[in-house]
Amino acid sequence: MTVLELKSYAKVNIGLRIMGRRADGYHDLDTYFHRIELHDNIRLSFELRDETSVSITGNEGYMPSTATDLMEKAARLFSTMTGIRFHADISITKRIPVQAGLGGGSSNASTVLTALDSICGGVLSRDDLMDVSLALGSDVPFFTSGFAAAHGQGRGEVLEEIEAVDLPLVIVQRRGDVVSTREAFRMADEERRDRLPLPPWTTDAARWRNLYTNDFDPIQPILKDRDYLECASTALFHSTSGSGSSQILVASGPEDAARLTAMLEASSAYLDVIGTSFSKFIH
């Protein structure tokens, strides 16, 4: 039996444009992905068997009993692609907020997929790994790429590595907020206008607020909260991550991050505030 202790990192989006609806029903996006230090912990036990089976613990609090965890889908797809039969026992300690635009489920799936490939001696090519990742979800290829930061286009699978930054940031989520990704895409489709891609990438975070916007901002309930906006306006940069509902506030340094955290926590009892930082290096 092989046992691995793994870290599954979250991501944020710095700017996101919905470029248009494709013939296959998906939408082309233009965004900058950046890995952050916030992570889940995954314990993966692997043993060769005659038939593939997967058991997962730790996801009971957020995964409906009728749904299949993306980690299980990743394991079974790996088995189908390679012909390798095994039992995978997966235990997860969840720290990344779910359905928050931070890519937690996608990261978990990528972490399991790449760990299984490593255990089995790297049987899949990089192209195969990226194809499997895209089959699992639009954000999964970024995590599989190994990039700390990347320019993402297409569904998110067309990736070009960019220079990463090393700054603290604060993740904010307001309890009870529900965001409809479907509604945001519907609004974009109805506009029926040519959309310009995001401006070129810069690591100068002080310039981000004038360069990178997120097309999902209009459907974020928290962005109608004056108290939150007053706090957020003092950050170096603030924006929605992915389709939301989480918001990211970039700080100029540790003291600034502590100031933002204190302001946010004092402004409302309904905000969940997480301090973290951009990840400049691959662990």
Image (spheres, rainbow, N blue to C red):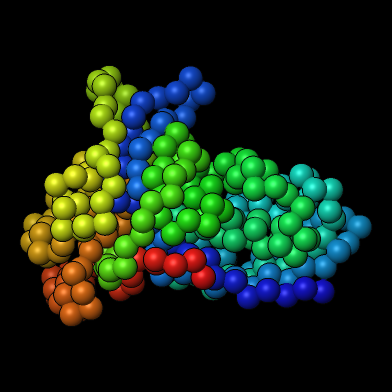
Q: Where does the N terminus fall, quadrant-wise?
A: bottom right
The residue closer to the viewer here, 159 or 61, is 159
- In the image, residue 261 above or below residue 111: below
* Any part of residue 217 in sight: no
Residue 63 appears at what percent x and percent y? 55, 58
- In the image, residue 16 above or below residue 13: above
Residue at 84% across / 53% down in the picture?
84
- Residue 199, quarter of the rendered image: top left
* Count of marks placed on residues: 0
The residue closer to the viewer here, 246 or 201, is 201
- In the image, residue 111 above or below residue 276: above
* Any part of residue 47 in sight: yes
- Residue 30, quarter of the rendered image: top left
- In the image, residue 223 above or below residue 193: below
Q: Is residue 97 left or right of residue 247?
A: right
Residue 11 appears at what percent x and percent y? 41, 58
Residue at 50% across / 40% down in the picture?
157
Residue 204 appears at what percent x and percent y? 21, 57
The residue closer to the viewer here, 49 or 134, is 134
The residue closer to the viewer here, 228 or 259, is 259
Residue 44 appears at what percent x and percent y? 68, 70
Q: In this view, does 131 lie to the left or right of 168?
A: right
Residue at 26% across / 27% down in the picture?
195
The extreme right residue here reads 50
Residue at 47% across / 30% down in the picture?
26
